[in-house]
Amino acid sequence: MQILFDTSLTVEHRLRALRLGDASARFLMRRAAEDLEERLLAVGRRFERAATLYCFGDEAKQAILASGRAADVLRIEADAAFLAGAPGRQGGMEALPLAPESIDLAVSLLSMHEMNDLPGLMIQTRQALRPDGLFLAAFAGSGTLAELREALLAAETELSGGASPRVLPFADVRDAGALLQRAGFALPVADIETVTVRYDTMFDLIRDLRAMGATNVLAERSRRPATRRLFGRAAEIYAERFSDPDGRVRATFSLVWVSGWAPHPSQQKPLKPGSARISLKDVL
């Protein structure tokens, strides 16, 4: 398994964000939680026991409770501090502390894009679900922070002739659907929602990312502190390429939503190839 992310640094950054306590910077989490509630309402069934996986807060649990789709919700976090004294379970980000077939609904919001073994975590989640249990997750996908990536890359290349990775690689929505199938989920679905946020400057975006705990956790990141000159030039490029007529700059967040069901005999299945009774040629 290739180690792309320093998951211990991920937890450290999220803990720092917890200490900062900037509620306004959790706007993406609140939006994802609202979307989660709507998606659960559309399912139209109740689940006996649910679990939220590494959401670094209680928004996902509150959304499940508000939907009325489950009354028993277990929170699983990477550090006990995220539970803030509430009932829950602590476990490593890529070793799910759940027994096989112990839950009916598993939810994860805005954390799976920072996991090295995402297929492995999905397999563990499917194994933890009882037959006909639902997995529903949202994570940052391809296109997220594309403007920041381009501005930093251009500035560093211009100033030093090369560039180190500073923005995470994000999965494409098609890759997400393939991961669900690889993990053994039935009826896999993946879709994407693009959120555009406007800021006065690039530095205001970076301030929000820091308050979210969403700064660079790449294993191959440069250990040398970025210079003020680099960020100053990147901010200029950002404003030149991604500003609106009023001078404010845009930042893109692409949220990939995935859902899949633990296999059960009652679920719909595709027909076997060659089993059709009507020819498409005849229809056309």
Image: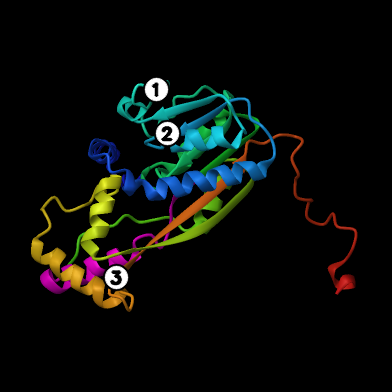
* Quarter assignment of residue 161: bottom left
Q: Is residue 265 left or right of residue 86?
A: right
Q: Which mark lies nearer to you, 2 or 3?
A: 3
User: Does residue 252 appear in this view?
Assistant: yes
Q: Residue at label 3? A: 248
Label 1 environment density (alpha carbons within 10 Å; few <14, some 14–19, many ≥20): few
- What distance separates the C-alpha of mark 2 from that of mark 3? 32 Å
Label 2 environment density (alpha carbons within 10 Å; few <14, some 14–19, many ≥20): some
Provide residue 209's location: percent of width, then percent of height: 28, 52
Q: Residue at x 55, y 52 (%)?
A: 177
Identify the mark nearer the N-term, 1 or 3: 1
Vertical placement of 109 versus 280: above or below? above
Question: Which stretch did the figure color magenta?
Answer: 138-161
Q: In the rendered image, which quarter contains the N terminus?
A: top left
Residue 58, disc: 2
Q: Residue at label 1? A: 86
Judging depth in this view, the residue of 176 and 206 nearest the camera is 206
Q: Residue at x 56, y 53 (%)?
A: 190
Provide residue 11's location: percent of width, then percent of height: 28, 36
* Quarter assignment of residue 111: top left
Q: In the rendered image, which quarter contains the C terminus?
A: bottom right
The answer to whether mark 2 and mark 1 are in CB contact below 8 A is yes
